[in-house]
Image: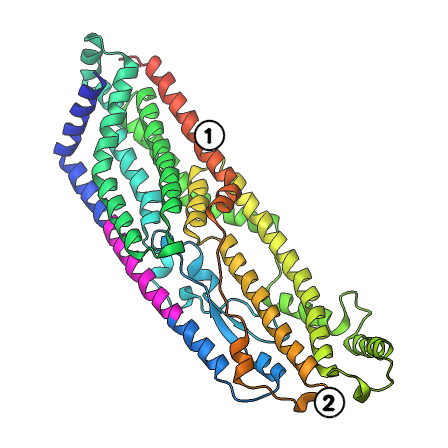
Amino acid sequence: MVLSIARKEFVDLTRDGRFRWASAIVAVLLVVATAAGWRNWRDVREEHDRAQAEARGQFEGQEEKNPHAAAHYGLYVFKPKPMLALFDSGVDPYTGVSVYLEAHRRNEVRDRPARDATALQRFGELTPASVLQMLVPLLIIFLAFPAIAGEREQGTLRQVMSLGVRPSTLMAGKALGLAAALGLILVPAAVLGGTLLAMGSTGPEHAGPDALALGAGYLLYLGIFLAGSLAVSARSRTSRGALVVLLGFWIANAMIAPRLATDLARRAVGTPSSAEFAAAIQRDIKGGINGHDPEDRRLDRLKQELFRKHGVATVEELPINFQGVALQAGEEYGHAVYDRHYGALRDAFDRQDAIRAGLGLAFPSLAIRDLSMALAGTDNRHARDFADAAEAYRRDLVRALNKDLEVNGADLGFMYQAGPDLWRSMPRFDYEPPGLVATLRHQWLAWLSLAAWSAGLLSLARRSARRLRVDA
């Protein structure tokens, strides 16, 4: 009986011109967004690889110079473009793609694509994720709102019930028929996306498990709208009433919730401006973190410690290059300052993220949004992880160059010079983003929200079916 009802619902929908037009539009948007995302991912990956190779070549091609001067010459490193960014670009357009690494300074990630966007693009980027998060739920609502209420208004619900069809069977058949109709749109798009991912997979870059987890999350999300639409339709006296309620739910999730979450997070947890942040760092480096340990005093204390350690009275008598030691000591102190300020900033961002994640319990659109960006590797956490990895590499690189100056330039001071052999011996930057397990563990609240909404609305749909009345 369930299959018969589902077949009838499926045939009625596919014969409806409104469904054909609406589904065609959504399907075209999904395909276009997927194809455009694939092309963008491929082009950006090639550009990043080429730019990274050129930056490394310029670093290794330096002439002979003091190693610390080479540290100041620095180099650029570029954030790899994750494969699933073709599905959900997340915050990548706003967080930058490259970092300039140099001695004494932790630079921000720069070259944000959003700055080069047209006025039209700033209203929002068309991605498969945005289509699934906003347009497909709206399509579900327009398909499902008259599923039960429309039958009641037309008088066909009484006829169906008189044939001995159980309300739960009717609800299950309607749900199955609607899901099959949606499958005509979603399955081809999923096949296209899977094919493109397979084409771009190379060894450890394979994104299959992440894509499967992403698909599971979106099935829960779309199931929320399907179950909710049927429950509301079953409880509403008229189709119009059901549509008003469901559109209100969609507007709250698609339009109100994202802005509300951002504003509440910013009001609850403030962050310094870029100018204030940079000024605080420079103040602590010059005057000391506690304000009573200036740079000159730290340098003099280091000099006296080296004199006692090596049993000498002057810098010239030291068996090592004092400049190399002093420069690295300054770097280490700078590390402590940067760790202090960036740690406080990260804590503030984490608290903001926690507020937004908590609101995901009230708005499933926020939960799927966070989960989608996280699994695509384009959320704030991945952006900060790349920045931290670049900073760790910068510290290792500068430390190695200063160490060469310390050990090999003992009696030459800043006159000591190294050549291309030293530059080529420096390790390369190789960024590995957080794995799937770590991402899933971090997004436990989003999974909980989607699961709770799914279970709650499924239970509501079942209760609505049990209480279904032809004249309700």
Distance, label 1 to label 2, CA atoms, is 70 Å
Q: Say whether disc 1 or disc 2 marks the residue closer to the N-terminus.
A: 2
Instruction: Judge whether 66 appears above or below 351 on screen.
Output: below
Judged by depth in the image, the label closer to the viewer, 1 or 2, is 2
Tell me, for residue 174, which label it has, or none.
none
Q: Position of residue 149 (x, y in %)?
A: 26, 22
Q: Nearer the viewer, residue 237 or 42?
A: 42
Q: Which residues are magenta?
A: 29-49
| Quarter residue 104 falls in | bottom right
Position of 197 compared to 360: left or right? left
User: To which residue does mark 2 refer?
Assistant: 411
On the rendered image, what quadrant is the C terminus found in? Answer: top left
Tell me, for residue 452, which label it has, or none.
1
Position of 226 compared to 100: left or right? left
Residue located 26% across and 13% down the image: 470
Residue located 44% across and 56% down the image: 91
Q: Main secondary structure of the magenta part?
A: helix
Amino acid carrying label 1: it is: Ala
